Image (tube, coloured by chain):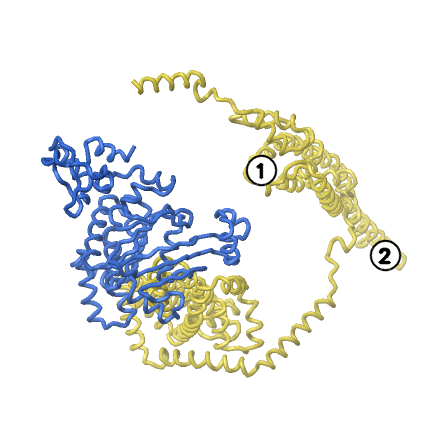
Chain colours: A yellow, B blue
Amino acid sequence: MSTKAETTELDQKAASTGSVQDIEVDRKALDASIAEFVDRNPEFYARTFQTIHDTTSGIPRVFNIAAALLGPLWAAARGVWGFFWGFLILEIIAWVQIGRGTWGELGASDLAQAERQTNRAEQFLEEARLVKEAGEDPTRFETLSNNLMRAAERSREAAEAAAADSFAILMVGLGLLVVLRIFQGVWSNVTYEKQYTKWRISPQSVSSGFQTQNIIFGVILVLVIMPLTVYRFTIDNVPDWLAVFPANPDHYGLTARWLEGAIDNAAKGGAGAFDSVVIAVRQILDTLSLALIGTPWPVVMAVICVFAWRAAGPRVAIFTASALAYIALLGYWEIAMETVSLVGAAVVLCVVFGIPLGIWFGKSQRAYKFAEPVLDLMQTLPAFVYLIPIIAFFGTGNPPGILATIIFGMPPVIRLTALGMRGVPESIKEAAVAFGASRSQLLKDVEIPLALPSIMTGVNQTILMCLSMVVIISLIGGGGLGKVILEALQFAAKGPGLLGGFAILFVAMVIDRIVQGAFRRADQK
Amino acid sequence: MSETVVELSNVWKVFGDRADETIAETIQRPLSKQEALDEFGTVIGVRDASFDVKRGEIFCIMGLSGSGKSTLVRHVNRLIEPSAGSIRVLGQDVSAMNKTELREMRARDIGMVFQHMALMPHRSVRENVAYPLEIRKIPKSKRWAISDYALGLVDLTGYEDRLPRELSGGMQQRVGIARALASDPEILLMDEPFSALDPLIRLQLQDQFKALVRDLNKSTLFITHDLDEAIRIGHRIAIMKDGVIVQIGTPEEIVTQPADDYVREFVQGISRLKLVRAHTIMEPLGGANTKDLANAVRVDGQKDLDFLIDISIGSEDPLVVTENGKEVGLISKTTLLRGIQGGK
């Protein structure tokens, strides 16, 4: 009974509203909102937007006369800045053509050449006359003069032809301008409607209405950009200050000298500290290279292969053995081991300092906020740039090279350790605290174990970064395979360069495979 | 049953820098949460809450999300510092403890179970259960023995060496309960332990938990957003709304005498059959003569409606209610039906 009643009610409702297609948009509310958005000329834009809304395919049949007449200035007034810049640049191209066509000195260079050639021909004629007076054969000079005269004639013809082209260029420019304006007249409404849709979502951040400051800004931009650019491209002899930035060479010299003095003083002042850093790094490096180079090569090779097997399985072990064979057979063994100890020393230092820093930054949001720009800088600064202060403070050779490598390689392990620490679920930390864990117990039992996968990814990335950097440090006297490449590069020696390059590639691949394999096994545990 | 193990009096928690001002102002004129946020930039979590938990009791705190119940329970082991008020656990003032004493109390006296289990994914089930003991530096052999025993209590023998992720949700939560029981604490804090589980498993665990707590004689603070659950396992229930405890009472009191419309709305859908007892709905005898009811059935005042219906079906006469052997009231069929309806 009740079901039946409900059905009839539903039927009635359906009958009164009809199908979904018949639902009409509330024009009054929509027009009011459009009027609020456009400020001036609301009727026109309400009508236009409606046409755009009703157009389902193709170009909407709307035309904005203001946009067609004013071009980019319309866009500026309406705050459609993307439209403004795009069409400003396109219009400059049109205006440059128009300028060249009307007042540009087309063929001016050809005319000047004709002038020069005529002068030279007259000189030769004069010389011919003198030679004739001296009673010698003037034919050679006369031939030269005639040739030059003919060349001058050709140049003059070219100049006339270029001048005749000016009308065509003017027409192309005008045509382009007209096309651009028509395009703006059509496209402006569509773009403006899109801006309106965005404005509905965030009225604060999307500009709307008709604002005087926008118009002033647009007019200034057009006045600065348009005439100067057109002038530069249409007039041959522009003043120097417009063509080249009027830099004062004294400023450069003074600044550079002052900076040099400052760095020298700092290096002298902190010499003790810098030297002890270098000594400490050298200790680590020497220990590693002694272990890798001092130990008989069969032992080292066997250990590396077995380690690869244990850590990453038989396939990686076979690859490792072949890579080692390549390196050893080409006589790169010792030098490759030097590279490995350089990378090893850098990675050890990165991990020793990076993981505690990462833990700190992971726990303290404020510390991380201060550290983040420094980390960004460490990664974005091109290596060549910080090699210079490193030389100034730490000198040249392997230990300063390791310091440069650390600067480049440390950010990933810091970042990923911090990321891992922040990713530890609050609930698990809370549980440990609720059972009476102290801060150190929390760190040891919960935070580090749970952040470990992320930390390991960071270590792996740091190793790869160090590997790529260890080649570049040959520029400041670093040894290893990088030095081989650098020497090959300096003498454009293709053979040695490629062989050394492959040796580095194999070292990198072996380390990467072994480390990734080891981490994957640790992850699965 | 009478000894108090947990006692909170006038506990406030206000988040934000101007907590003290907010409390002082709110005592004078009751600010709403929104007003406190607008005027002081503070968020009131708990407002003047007082209750106590007796030994062996399951005390439920029931409220919807955002009502402050989880915040309130975290004051007991001072995972959250109170803005005002005093908290006593086993006679000791929790606010006065230093860090070491606090850690010791958390490890020894309080076991906690969390809604999202919060098991350590890298440790086996056994090592998870043994973690509270590990914190207390109990030797490994002892830890293992105790955790195996605790896992036995929750029927998880045979899963000791599995990782938590290999277990189902219900089993993981039982590991959580075993972990809370491992250090044999006096008090259990249960923070919506069964909310994330499906209904059937939830019922099973509720019964299992109730029996376990009774056998081990633990005192429990049980947080839930589900009134059915609170009524099922709680001896007493506190109902919270917007940081305020609206009513504290036994399940029967909550259902039969709701303190305000908010509680009334909640208890509407609750079945009264197992809750309401004979002495609540009976008409007092008031010295009336029961001689002509000599053949009528006598029922104890503590029997619930479900039981009364069964008896009443087999008897024409009204039921005579007795308490301690004395006849105290009558329940006619009409009274019984009205009682089931909820007293119209």
The amino acid on which the numbered mark 2 sits, given as a three-letter code, is Glu
Q: Nearer the viewer, residue A502 or A440?
A: A440
From the image, tell me which residue sits under label 1.
Answer: A199
From the image, tell me which residue sits under label 2.
Answer: A127
User: In 3D space, how far apart are the residues under numbered discs 1 and 2 (Cα atoms)?
Assistant: 80 Å
Quadrant of image for the C terminus of chain A: bottom left
Quadrant of image for the N terminus of chain A: top left
x 20%, y 56%: residue: B214
Q: Tell me whether marks 1 and 2 sit on the same chain.
A: yes
Q: Nearer the viewer, residue A372 or A109?
A: A372
SS label for mark 2: helix
Question: Which chain's residue wears label 1?
Answer: A
Q: Position of residue A431 (x, y in %)?
A: 33, 60
Badge 1 crowding class, 10 Å Cα cut-off, few under 14, some 14 to 19, many 20 or more, is some
**Among the two numbered marks 1 and 2 on one chain, the one whose residue lies closer to the N terminus:** 2
x 50%, y 79%: residue: A277
Question: Which chain's residue wears label 2?
Answer: A
